[in-house]
Image: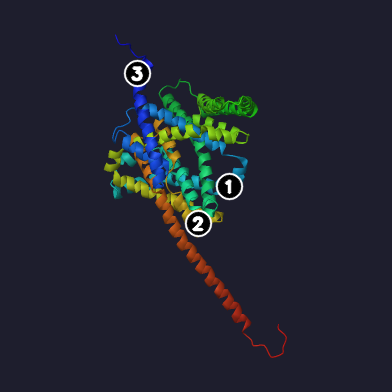
Amino acid sequence: VPRRLPAPLRSFDGLGQDAIVFLAATVAVVPICKKLDLSPVLGFLAAGVVLGPYGLKGLKDLSDLDTLGEIGILFLLFEQGLELTVERLRSLFKFAFGLGTLQVALTTAAFCAVPFMGGSQVLETVFGASRDLVQIQQLDEAFVIGAALSLSSSAFVLKILQEKGQLGSPTGRAALGVLLLQDIAVVPLLVLLPIVELQNTVATAAEGAAAAPTQDLATLFGTAMGGLTALLAFGYILLPKIFNAVAGARSSETFIALCLLTVAAAGSFTKTIGLSDTLGAFIAGILLAETNYRTQVEADIQPFRGILLGLFFVTTGASVDLPLLAQQWPTALGVLIGLISIKAAITGGIATQFGLSNGDAVRTGLLLSGGGEFAFVVLNLAKNLNVLPFDQTKLLSGVVVCSMALTPALSSLGDAAAERLNRGDKEARMNAKRERKRGRGGEAGGAPRARGAPPA
């Protein structure tokens, strides 16, 4: 009689097949993207679209892969915290907390206001959009959409700036500052969204039962602040000592295990006190940012972060509803045009107030006008909390993917526009300089000086 396999191994079959497909896709995607000079993020998204349920159906069970992909988001936030050093904040302070704050606030407000100022009607009338697909009735729905669309792609933008040698240019420093602020701003968004939705759920439930117990926002806030204080105290007092002890053992496996434990434990703790697990991972990174182990931690988690984050983008691409985009392509096109034009106009418009020339402002606005990786995180959280309708989430995810794919073209368009504007500004300055010289020459030559007379 053949021996039966243990149940855990049998249940691993589906995940194991999907893992093989994903690893094979990773082996193919990264070299191809390097060859074509494309960002691997776009490659992973495209692989997800091809292998997903609307493509070749190579991935059978997205739920398990999605869970692993969300762990990749924890490592992404952890890495963002590691990079948030005092020196980096100081060097980009003006662009991050000045330009970046205004960019996030104004674009979020603009996208939030568009549905209530005729934007939905324009999509219905001009682009033939379905009312159920574009109608926004609640303020929290509009806010989530606005916040998600206000974010830009660090992976695409940084790669483009590096390839063009513009990281040290005014455009590069402005873009780095805005991206840094966006990375910071997404953390409170991921924290507050579950709290507000829980508060709304409790309030809705209490409407039908006056005697039902309610848990107000102040109680939730107090619990969260107490838990965060305890986490910070542990991180500043005990965490460095733990890392010192493990580093003293000179065991690379143990050190890597401690890094993974730090991310997982911090995320689990903040989730237990009612906050987002991504906040815990972000705080853990901040706590280690000023220690001597920052560089080693970054190097050790890089493989895990890269693979798991790639898995997140594959599952995100697999969730793109191709039939929906094909059926509603005029609507998707309208949203895409609105996303790029509004974002570029706002970012470029305020950039001139922070010392950028007109050309550099236009270049920065177009470079940051596409969607970003964190938009998928925000939209995925909103979907899990039932904030947005399912079809709206799928449509917006597809639009963000398309906008990210257009980032290189938008950057080239920005370079061409900036060159033309800078050339025009240079000619205007030269003309003004010639006019000033001509004016001074006219004043000097107004009265001829007598021979031998001393100059005035």
Of badges 3 and 2, nearer the viewer stands 3
User: Alpha carbon of mark 3 to alpha carbon of mark 1: how far?
Assistant: 52 Å
Q: Is residue 424 above or below residue 371?
A: below
Residue 320 in view: no
Name the element at disc 1: loop
Q: Is residue 36 above or below residue 378?
A: below
**Label 2 sits on residue:** 360
At label 1, which amino acid type do we have? Leu
User: Alpha carbon of mark 2 to alpha carbon of mark 1: how far?
Assistant: 17 Å
**Label 1 sits on residue:** 92
Name the element at disc 3: helix
C-beta proximity under 8 Å, tags 3 and 1 = no
Of badges 3 and 1, nearer the viewer stands 3
Dot 2, how many residues are within 10 Å of its Cα: few (below 14), some (14-19), or many (20+)?
A: many
At label 3, which amino acid type do we have? Arg
Check residue 10 in the rendering and tell me which mark sits there, or answer none.
3
Judge by depth and name the residue closer to the eye, 198 or 274. 274
The image position of residue 11, as x and y in percent, is 35, 19
Judge by depth and name the residue closer to the eye, 48 or 24. 24
Name the residue located 45 percent from the left edge and 39 percent from the top edge: 374
